[in-house]
Image (tube, helix red, strand yellow):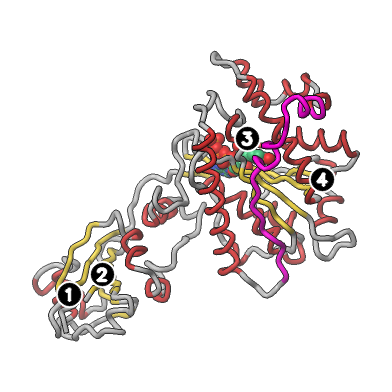
Amino acid sequence: MAAPMLRCFSRGRRSGPPSLSGFLPLELRRAHSGAQGILAAQKARGLFKDFFPERGTKVELPELFDRGSAGYTPQTIYCGFDPTEDSLHVGHLLALQGLFHFQRAGHNVIALVGGATARLGDPSGRTKEREALDAGRVRANARALHRGLESLAANHQQLFADGRAWGSFTVLDNSAWYQQQHLVDFLAAVGGHFRMGTLLSRLSVQTRLKSAEGMSLAEFFYQVLQAYDFYHLFQHYRCRVQLGGSDQLGNIMSGYEFIHKLTGEDVFGITVPLITSTTGAKLGKSAGNAVWLNRDRTSPFELYQFFVRQQDDSVERCTQALYHSSIDALEVMSDQELKELFKEAAFSELVLDPGTSVLDTCRKANAIPDGPRGYRMITEGGVSINHRPVTNPESVLVVGQHILKNGLSLLKIATSSPLPVCCNCYSAE
Ligand SMILES: Nc1ncnc2c1ncn2[C@@H]1O[C@H](COP(=O)(O)OP(=O)(O)OP(=O)(O)O)[C@@H](O)[C@H]1O
Ligand SMILES: N[C@@H](Cc1ccc(O)cc1)C(=O)O
């Protein structure tokens, strides 16, 4: 048998200042609404920030959403994402979590890709106009976002299925209904229902009008398109709730007013808090501080580090594989995934002869000091392989026990420093 070659990665938990404030734990599995009702439960957890209109939040909204109440029927809720880039980012997770909670509570959710709105650019929360994107680029981004949303929904389904009937998860693109719109028809049918005074009063508009750069008509018109989207989804999918970051409240209000005027019916808005950096800047594309969910833009390792760097009281660990006993998670990872997970870590490659001992492996990986001190670290229980302590330095590595099915060995060394150093090794024949 050819000698297995181990590639060993050494890494410690990076310390450093927390870069994010107000982040919420991603504990989807535990977050059942229970007897409290989904709205109250998520408000109490801090996932939901504001409800609009205020008056509907005491009775109407809970009535619609809570399984136990008389008015309950499955509802449709949507949230929009503009494809100004080709990946979702960490800032989108709260809104997505909100959608997933509704889906698990039996409601139908729509993730709307803004293939049309992205061409105009939402001025909300921005001090400058966006760089214009050509149609081809937006289409490519929209396809990528569509895939990202579908794959998050599939993961959610796979990981959190709880035997209850869930609502549907649908991805739509608003370019589907704007492509067929004639400008003059649209302005004639829709434009008359919007009052300039109200549109001008929006914070996003006020801020931009006061800026040196001013505001373009395209940007000014953005809120009309988002309002029309809400109306379109209300008409075609009976969608009565729009979810979004708290910077979206003005656009959501425009939708509410438009629908109410045209149909006399009430719809609702729910916002999630904005995830910000420590400087208070919204974490996202515009601020240039986005942490991407696509692995080719932010590696799983960097994403992991992003969460690890957060203050303990603001975020719970997202990762079981390295520090807990979830060896199963490592065992099913492909070579590619492992490479990505440890992309940033320093590593050394080892060729193991048959009969290589624990001591040899630790020394070759530079995981323990030379001489008796290193030897003692093993005998005193400071070394574990695949989460099992190895106290005999002379014991030989056994495939299936010390080397997992995919060739990986996770070597963990307890050092005198407060943070453990991990050596992750995987082998190829
Ligand atoms: N940092 C964040 N925290 C909470 N919600 C966010 C954050 N970033 C985006 N969102 C929300 O995600 C939804 C989709 O955002 P979208 O991708 O269209 O723009 P964006 O990421 O806000 O872009 P930009 O940073 O360029 O303004 C919106 O409801 C938005 O409020
Ligand atoms: N305006 C939202 C995205 C969006 C687009 C279309 C909608 O109908 C709703 C939301 C944002 O930029 O964050």
| C-alpha separation, residue under disc 3 versus residue under disc 4 | 19 Å
Q: Are marks 1 and 2 in contact (CB under 8 Å)?
A: yes
Q: Where's residue 174, x and y in %?
A: 66, 41
Q: Nearer the viewer, residue 419 or 12?
A: 12
| C-alpha separation, residue under disc 2 versus residue under disc 4 | 56 Å
Q: Is residue 108 left or right of residue 69?
A: left
Query: Which residue appears at 62% of the width and 36% of the height?
Result: 116
Q: Are marks 3 and 1 in contact (CB under 8 Å)?
A: no
The 10 Å Cα crowd at callout 4, few under 14, some 14 to 19, many 20 or more, is few
Q: Nearer the viewer, residue 89 or 394?
A: 89
Specify the farthest residue to the top. 212
The 10 Å Cα crowd at callout 2, few under 14, some 14 to 19, many 20 or more, is many
Q: Where's residue 342, x and y in %?
A: 31, 60
Q: Nearer the viewer, residue 371 or 114?
A: 114
Q: Which residue is mark 3?
A: 117
Q: Which residue is mark 1?
A: 361
Instruction: State yes or no: residue 260 in magenta.
Output: no
Q: Which residue is mark 2?
A: 425
Q: Quick one: SS at disc 4?
A: helix
For residue 336, say whether it is visible: yes
Q: In which quadrant of the rendered image does the N terminus lie?
A: bottom left
Mark 1: amino acid: Thr
